[in-house]
Amino acid sequence: MKILFIYSSEGVDPSSEPLRSWSKVQFGISYISAVLRAHGHQTKLLVLGSDSWEKSQRLISSYMEEFDPRIVCFTAVFSQFSVIEKAARHIKKNWPDKYYVIGGVHATLNPGAVIRGPFDALCVGEGEYPVLELCAQLEGGEVPHGISNLWLKSPDGEISRSAPRDFIRDLDILPFPDREMWAPWIKKDPNDEITVLAGRGCPYDCTYCSNHAIRRVAAGKYVRMRSPESIVLEIASIYDACPQRKIYLEAESIALEKRWTFDFCDKLASFNASIGNAISYGCNFRVSRQSLDEELFAAFERANFYKINIGLEAGSERVRREVLRRNYSNDDFLKAASMARRHGMAVNVYNLIGIPGESLADHMETVRINRLCQPDNLCTSIFFPYPGTELYRTCISQGLIKDFVNTTKERRTAVLDLPGFSSAQIQEAYGLFDSRVYKGRFPWWKNLLRAAYGRVPAQARSAISRAMVKVPIMRGLREGLKAKLFGPAKKAHDQSLQI
């Protein structure tokens, strides 16, 4: 059976290599595709751009006519859903005999609203085996029925909700994700970073995140790590196919289970030794008392980790603890950054601006802590309330959401007007954040360019990036600017971090 997967990405040209990096690969559909292929089905991927509907329509027609799928599968987070629903309505109108399925975070957290759209089925939670069972029923000429995790819509509009199945306990039973389907859509860059999934699930209850809600959609263990052996085998297969210099290990935190982490780092170090330490690694790191362990960072160094991403989110300990439910001190955060740097790792810091309950003074505390840390890279967003999360419900109950904004500007445009932090102040704080953090560390014109670049719409950044890649002289200028503007920050405060 033929199955077409449809994915959407903001600010891209869908006609030619619209995705800038292998890090843009979406794991949900990649794993589903791998399972389907392992059982003899044919799969294909179509990537749509949110800003190019005419081009998207032409691509849809081409793929539907030439590939002729029996099932079309869609996935979306909240900000992608309007584009995906529009595409689904267009396809169903023109090819009504196909079977249409949607899954992903937005569908999982808001199934009642989403199933009213142009879909025949909706997947709540993990989709590998529900979609495989759906294919088997359709292939056998059956009317789909009784498939755990799927909400099924009959021709008369009646919806049947099957019981959820437990989370997949052993992730090693899954084949490696299907990256082949993404190859036509990703810009070729030998210095790119490929992402490898190390585990699924998160034990924490951050109110702005979807994990606490997804954890409740099924029974069984939610936080699961793959075996170190399986991950290393996948890395080896990637390296054999196309020698890759950087791999990002995707998990909510690499140090959730320290015994597993030490074992994994040992096996990674052994593999690296066999290829001359050709690959360096990055990961997410959640600050906690148990993870502030010098031996842990020494293990990262032996395994050739070159960076960690840390979510500070808010410099105000009150906002972090009472609003976001992230329970660690600023001293803990600075200790983690210091340990990482002592072991040769760059530190990238995630920050949120305009969190419910945050004041301008609270935000300036975020600036202060970042100035102490001097991150090698800042990953800064304006808070956006995602439906299905606890903080979204808080915004509703407090009357903070009055009229929903265009989601194409999510995390770059202030959507809340807080009592102690107006939308205008939030927007200004976002634009000035880099310059405030690095004030005195870079010349003024670098700070200005960094701030201006962050305000450029994604579509324009994509167009500039494509032009700079295609023209040799522009490519050189691009690399020079990138090195000057986004290279490692000066570590003038390193000594003060030796806490």
Image (cartoon, helix red, strand yellow):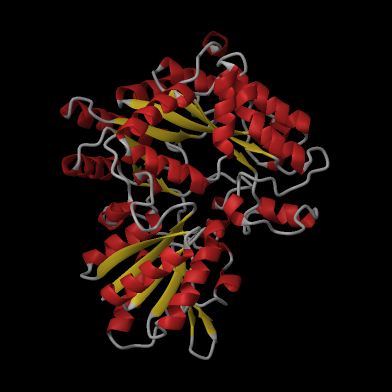
User: Is residue 293 visible to us here?
Assistant: no
Q: Check the image and name the residue furthest to the right.
A: 419
Q: In x, y percent, where is residue 453?
A: 54, 34
Q: In x, y percent, where is residue 132?
A: 32, 71
Residue drawn at the location 56% of the way across and 14% of the way down: 441
Residue drawn at the location 58% of the way across and 56% of the way down: 213
Question: Is 174 drawn above or below residue 467 in the view shown?
Answer: below
Image quadrant in which you'd find residue 332: top right
Viewer-proximal residue, 191 or 157? 191
Q: In x, y percent, where is residue 407?
A: 60, 55
Viewer-proximal residue, 45 or 259? 45
Q: In x, y percent, where is residue 463?
A: 44, 45
Q: Check the image and name the residue furthest to the top.
A: 495
* Horizontal side of residue 277 vs 312, given as left or right: left
Considering the image in quadrants, where does the C terminus appear? Answer: top right
Question: Is 270 drawn above or below residue 257 in the view shown?
Answer: above
